[in-house]
Amino acid sequence: MNIRNNIALSDSGFLFDPSTGDSFSVNPIGMEIIRMIKGGKTDPEIRQYLLSTYQTDEATIEKDYYDFLKMVEQFHLIEKTDGKEKD
Amino acid sequence: MKRLQYERPLIQRVNTGILNKFGTRTEFTPFTHIDDVSVKDLLQQYGSPLFVISEKGIREKYHEAVRAFTNRYPKVQFAWSYKTNYINAVCNIFHQEGSWAEVVSGFEYNKALQNGVPGEKIIFNGPDKTDEDIRSAIANKSPLHIDHLDELYRITELAEEAGVKPEVAIRINMDTGIYPMWDRFGFNYENGQAWDAINKIILANKLELVGLHCHIGTFMLSPSAYAVAAGKMADLALGIRNKFKKNIKYLDMGGGFASRNTLKGSYLQGADTSPSFDQFAEAICTALLNAGFLQDELPLLILETGRALVDEAGYLLGSVISNKRLADGRRATILDFGVNVLFTAFWYDHKISPAQEFSHYTEDSVLYGPLCMNIDVVRENCTLPPLRKGDHVVVHTVGAYNMTQWMQFISLRPAVVLIDKDRNAHLIRNRETLNSIEVEEVMPSYLKDFKL
């Protein structure tokens, strides 16, 4: 899974999808996750980073992280690495 | 390394469409203290959820209302509407301020008596007065407001039985140009029922007609309807003076003034649309002063407003149980209070604030209560910061009708705390226990035992 190459990221927390014209607002921690995905980090690496960086617990990270990924997927911002590319 | 404050990762599509002129409304300003008392400390001490009432809020609102009417009319009396909030400590704040009591059942009547309100200062309204209630009201010289002819006849019989001529008023309903027109209570003005009742009472000479009462609706957003009502009430009072040479002592204009809550489906916020006490007072007092009473014959103006006096002084504090994602992608937040204790969630979009600091990111969420019932929705949609399990929220403007209409359904009712003028918190109603409910149950002996 990766963020599609044509998705533009701004430093201030905006995503732009040129294929649909949609813009998205992302909070700082969400932006960190997106950059890590783009940077090729794996799920366990990202979760471990979040756990060591933020005052929270593993269960919360797991719940919120996968919920966030699901939303990113629903907004068609990712491409699957198994060959089934999502637009 | 010190770990950073955690906030749930959020991504939201930016919607650029037609917004209303106020833009997107958010409610993320944290509300951490009520009258300088920490919300967190209150929840820690008394548990969650918790109703909190600000005594300062009540007294200030009451003074505002009294000032609005007494500045415009010489004889004004407020009567506290027990059904709006009949927790004794709340009632007694109003009684300390000089309010009489206005009750609509034997239960409320006895509550007012037990609170120490003199009988002649308890107005007894409502369509259901038992013989016991009527006898008690007659003995205590409480003004009985008659709702229907059956009640009129029964009061007459019981007064004869007691050998007294009790003071009564009749409730009038009328068309004031609003919808819905309340015509289920009292006698109609337009079709002559009101005059029929007046004639019966005065000509029979068994009851002393001292007042006329009306209550034209609830959550009224149009002061002009009260001007129409006051005009019609004055017309009846002047008609009685002309026909029977008898002065009506008081006109009771009831209540129904809107609070600052926002009704579901309304375009504007309640805080922007609800008329002020000054607007209601201007409408009512101007109509009465222009009606044609001689100066020394002006009737006492009684007001029974409840909601507008106490709603804003009440808060409901609660906690987040969980967050979840609904099938259609919407965020849902489950709170530890629902429609069982926040009954007014059925008709208001209550303002709900987080009780702790957050970043400026927000998301839309459905707010559910804890009941295992589909109807338990506190807000269909509310823009809030990303709340975590255990975070606290404050529901505003809940002082009216919740602490009387709350249901003991599925869970027990919470405690109620009053914050006094010196910022001290007083427990004024205990959190219910299993025993509070079971004490009224009776188990037949053959059902006591079973084997599984």
Image (cartoon, coloured by chain):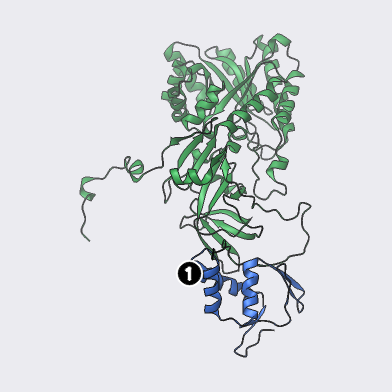
Chain colours: A blue, B green
**Residue A14, horizontal then vertical, whole percent:** 72, 69
Question: Callout 1 environment at 10 Å: few (<14), some (14 to 19), or many (20+)?
Answer: few
Q: Which residue type carries mark 1?
A: Glu
- Identified at 60% across, 41% down, the residue is B397
User: Which quadrant of the figure has residue B232?
Assistant: top right
Residue B122 position, x and y percent, is: 51, 21
Residue located farthest toward the front when viewing the structure as drawn: B1
The answer to which image quadrant residue A11 occupies is bottom right
Q: Is residue B282 above or below residue B337?
A: above
Residue B354: x percent and y percent? 58, 51
The subunit carrying tag 1 is: A
* Depth order, front residue of B434/A52: A52
Viewer-closest of B224 and B344: B344
Quadrant of the snapshot with the C terminus of chain B = bottom left
Residue B147 shows in this picture: no
In this rendering, the count of numbered labels is: 1
* Residue that mark 1 sits on: A58
| Mark 1, secondary structure of its residue | helix
Q: Residue at x 59, y 15 (%)?
A: B210
Q: Is residue B217 above or below residue B172?
A: below
